[in-house]
Structure formats: structure tokens, C-alpha cells
Amino acid sequence: MTLRYALTAFSIMVTSGPALAEKTDDDHKFTAERVFDLEYADDPQISPDGSQIVYARKSMDKNSDRVVADLWAINTRNGSHRPLVSGQGSNSSARWSPNGDRLIYLTTTNGKPDLRIRYMDSGDSFSLAQLSANPSAPTWSPDGQKIAFSMFIPDDPTSFAKAPRSPEGADWAKPVRVFDDLVFRFDGAGYLPKGKSHIFVLSAEGGTPRQVTQGENGFSAPEWLGNNSLLVTGNDVENATLDPIESEIYRVNLSDLSMTALTERNGPDYAPKISPRGSQIAYLGYDDRLKSYQHNELYVMNSDGSNIRHLSRNFDRSIDAARWRADGKALIVQAEVDGLLTLLSMDLSGNVKTLVRDMGGTAIGRPYASGSFSVAKKAGGSSPVIAYTQARPDRPAEVALSRSNKSGRRMTNLNDDALGHLRLAKIEEIKTQSTHDGREIQAWVALPPGFKADGSFPMILEIHGGPYAMYGPFFAAEIQRFAAEGYVTVYVNPRGSTGYGEEFAQLIDLDYPGKDHDDLMSVVDALVAKNYVSKDRLFITGGSGGGILTAWAVGKTDRFAAAASIKPVINWTTMALAADISRFVSRHWFRAQPWEQPEEYWRRSPLSIVSNAKTPTMLMVGEADWRTPAWEAEQFYTALKVQNVDTVLVKVPGAPHLIAGRPSQLIAKVDNIMGWFAKYDPVKAEK
């Protein structure tokens, strides 16, 4: 297979694998090209009566080098499994009509965005409208007669001059672009056109969409409140971008388009969900204390905004999503809990019961907690019927069905053909105490085929980003590729990780990077002490927040034979002034501007300790990354270069912050990292 982005010479070294690893036949090895064989389930949507599940079946298209999605249906009674919409590129956001007779979904038709309805009895479908931009978050009215969705509306670009008309056939330079918004480019989107997202309503029989929100501030995530009003989320104030997390929930009356704020506190309020009888609204949010991280809390209020109750007050985990149970007496919530992605039932008094502990599996590259679920709206009552993405250490996400408050039954087996005959890494959980303060730190170790605890194996420490995120025992192609080539690969949830309570996450507030480095080194110490790895064959890598901690480690210790810092922040001043989330960085992570506290910005920048660096270090970044832009990696590369420290800069053309978003990019990322490590592996150097 020819990769879209050619591998450098470093990757050639990977083919032999680290010394002392058991040699395996490629027929049973998770080789690089097998990344293209992977499939996974996403966004499972159960029908109102619980009889069917429609989900996005995602796969890696070899020709386009992209993840594509078809819509498949599962009969929950007999398990039959068949395609609904396929072969049209990517299809997404499938949502059932209130009585389950139709399905709305997003797709592209002839290269243009399309919002379509499919009749489930006949299989016929039609396009609802001619749309000027990509719609998002389509949702049905309770009577099934209307569809609400959000869509970008362009404004006139800012200009101070009118260019003269060029002669016919002339080849003039492109016109200047003028920006006057605080956020003028964003990762994954590039330089942003002038405009905002607004809410539209459209007849379920098709026609012309009606715009129902107006103004200079955007609105999103429509939710029906009865058949004649909508709930929308936004921040309708002057200079809204100065407070990047603030949002309120508004009610829009469709008869006169009047708008009323139902929430009004300082802090985000979002993701409203209407109770089955329409009398209550559940939503997420928190009181903004200007921290770098706070838990999402679950609230319920009356449909007019009165009588707000804080349901999750005594539950010390962040609520990622919430859906009403069919009887309206409890909500099914998604939360990270101690390394696992869980589904729980939370009643209206805040009492919590765990339902499912094996959710996840949709983050294919690295073992992040990522998944989704839906609840049947007219079935189950106090025994909810739930469709969710099910995670396993040795498989990407499958669709599972949970009934009667019980663990899920797997409904698909998407990867047995591709992975069932392979020798994959065994995932082992370990816990150790941090040398800093004795706190328990949870980690997982991927043990390569043929592993023996004889102290000979090379180790890769792979660090998650965020930094407010959580790894867990989930399938991850990058981890499996490292292990397939013989590396004992360890991934850790150091302080600052989510899923262990708000206090644990906030330990790095105004101190990042910091003591999380000690947590990581404690796990490495534990693996050496267990004789799992050779102390002379230690390697370190991580992306985004993990790239920061990798660069920080290079300045703190020389115990690693080589390092690979992927898409890092190196200089917090440039991050706070030029990244797409610059305002969030200064407002929440530092609570001061760089010119107000230059010493603090410098103290926490890996560049401040680069003079200590001796470790050979690879820097890698996407050329279209606007989250941690390329100049961050370039600064560290140059600083190492002028100090005569072995270093190399790898750039991924066209890649945003999601540097491994295309299959060939994932392969190139992993194989170049291993190629760099092989160059400095002392066992290989002896050959």
C-alpha cells in the first residue's frame, strides 16, 4: 500500500521490531496496513418502541484515505443486521421520528450538503430542501410535522477598500482578507468566513427552511419544547467571544420569534433535554469559577425556567450527556468513572445507580474514553431500553443493547474478521503511588505477543492530551501497533485526568505542567521494578497535552533513550495569543494575560527548561494545526538544534490538530515515532 504521506527513512527501521520480542508471522500481526481493515460503530439510535437500532457503521476507505460512515439497522428482537443507507460517502446524525415511521439523516448528494428523510416501511427517501451550507443537529417536533436544525449563515466580509476590476484574463494576486473577530481561524476549519450559526425550522414534507434566530451571536443545538417553541443554546450578549465558555438556554416562540432566556448564571448552561411529558428540562452546566477545569453538573428546571434543582450535587464525576428515562422519573447519564466510561441512572432526588461499565470504543487511535448512547422514548419505563457503543480492550466499538437495568448484550461483531485471528496485545491494569504525594495513579500496560517479565523489553510511555481527559482499557490502534512491534506500552491517567473527581483534576490548575510529571515517572519506576522493561530502553511520547509533558520530561530527566513530542505547546505566551483557543488559555489556565504575568507564562513553558535537554527528540505537528500551531513545535526544534541535541521536525501536510485523522496519517505518525526510537535503542545500536 502506498501511503498518502510517505514515511521518512526512520520508519524503515521498524520492520525488524525491537530485539528480544518474539517474532510473529505477519498473518497474525497487527501490521500498519491493517489499520485500513478496522470498523467501528458510532451514534447508535434506538427507535421509540425499542425494536430497532440505527447506527453509523464507520470504516476506513482506502481510496479516499478517510473514515466513511454508512447507516445500518439492527432488529433488537431477532438480531437481524442490514444496511439502510450506504455508498454515498458519509452519513450521520440519524434520528427517529416520534412514532418511529421515518428517519432523518445528514449526507451529501452530488457533492452538496443534504438533509434527507427515509420512510421506514418503503425505504423511499427524499431531500428536504436545497441548503446553502452543512446543516447540523436535526431534531423532530413532537408531532412529527417539523424539523429544526442549525446552519451557518455568512455575513458580508469586512472591507476598507474596493479593488479595481481586473482585466479579462489577468492573473492578479488574491484580494486581501480583513479580520476583525477575536476568533478568526479554528482548528479543523482554517480561516473562518464571516458569519454565525443560526436555527432553522422546516416542514417534514420539505420546502423552504425558515430562520428563527437572528443577530450577531450564533445559536445551536435546537430542542423542541412542544410543537410551537424551541430551546436553543447561545450567548446573546455584546462581545460574547471574550467569555468563551459562557452560554444560556433560550426559549424561542415560533409564532412571533420572541426569545426568552431560561438560564442566567455566570457559567455555561447547555444540552437541554425535555422530559417525556414536556413539563421539565434537564440540562448541563456549572457556575464558572474561572478554573482550568470544572465538572459538568446535571440540573432540572420547570419548562418556564423556574424551580432549578441540582441533581448531581453529591456525585463527584462530570456528566458528559443525559437522556430522560421513558417514565420521566430519572435520567440516564454518561460519566467517566475511575478509568471506565459508564452509564448510570440518576433519579430526580440525585440517587445514582450504575447500569453499564463497558461503554466507549469510538476513539480509534488512542485509548480515550469516547462513546455515545440513546434511550427508547416509549419503551421500558423504569427499566430503560438503551443502545450504546460497547468497548473492549481488543476491539473497537460495537453496538450493545441494555434492558431492565442490566449490562449490555452485544449486537454486532464488526471486527472479528479483521482482528479475530491476530495476536493482539494483552492489556493489564496497574496502580501505583505517586512519588510526589502518595496519591494512587491508575495506568494500563499493553504487553506485546511473546512478552516475558525478564527486564529486556523496550518501553514506550504514551501520554494523553487534554490535559483534562481520561484513558482507559479501550482498543487503540496506535497502542496495538507499538505492542505489535515489541514495545511494552504504558498509558497513564496522571493528576489532572478526568474521571477521578474534581479535586484530582484540579490538582494541576495553575500548575501545568508540574507534578503530573512525577506521577508519570512513578509509573515508569514501577514497570522497571516489576522487571517488565529494561531501564536502558525507555522511550516517551504523547500528543497535545501529552506532547507538552513529553517536552517537559526532556527538560526534567535524561532517563529516556529518545522522545517524540507530538503537537505540543512549547511557549505559553504564543499559545495564549495565537492559538484558536487563546482566550480560554489566558482566561482560565492563567487568569492573566502574558504581559501581566510574563514570569508565570515562562515558568510553565517547556521552552524555559530546554537548556537541560540531552534526549534525542522528535517534534511532529500537522501543517494545518491551529490548536497547537506548528510554530510551537518549531520553537523547541530550533532550541534543541542550536544546542546540538539530536532532533528532527516532522510535519504532516494538511493535518489539523487531529493529526492522525486519516488512516495513512495514523500509520505515518506511529511508524515514524517507532523509527525514531529504533535509531536510539541501545540494543539495536549493538547490531
Image: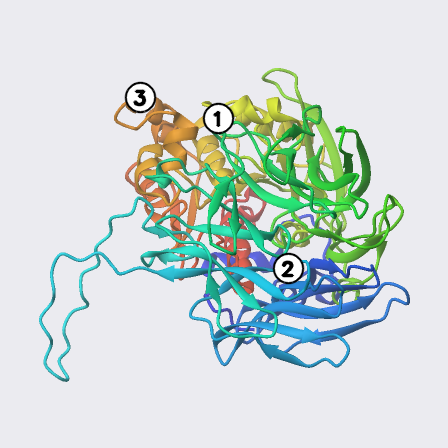
* Residue 291, disc: 1
The Cα atoms of the two marked residues, 1 and 3, are separated by 20 Å
Label 3: few (<14), some (14–19) or many (≥20) C-alpha neighbours in 10 Å: few
**Marks 1, 3: nearer the viewer:** 1
Kindly indicate whether the residue at mark 1 contacts the one at mark 2 (C-beta within 8 angstroms).
Answer: no
Pick whichever of labels 2 and 1 is earlier in the sequence.
2
Residue, far top: 437
The residue labelled by disc 3 is 599
The residue labelled by disc 2 is 141
Q: Is residue 471 among the parts visible in the rendering?
A: no
Q: Quadrant of the rendered structure where residue 494 is?
A: top right
Label 1: few (<14), some (14–19) or many (≥20) C-alpha neighbours in 10 Å: some
The Cα atoms of the two marked residues, 2 and 3, are separated by 54 Å
Q: Amino acid at mark 3?
A: Glu
Q: Amino acid at mark 2?
A: Ser
Vertical position of residue 154 compared to residue 448: above or below: below
Q: Is residue 81 among the parts visible in the rendering?
A: yes
Q: Mark 1: which secondary structure?
A: loop
Q: Amino acid at mark 1?
A: Lys
Total marks placed: 3
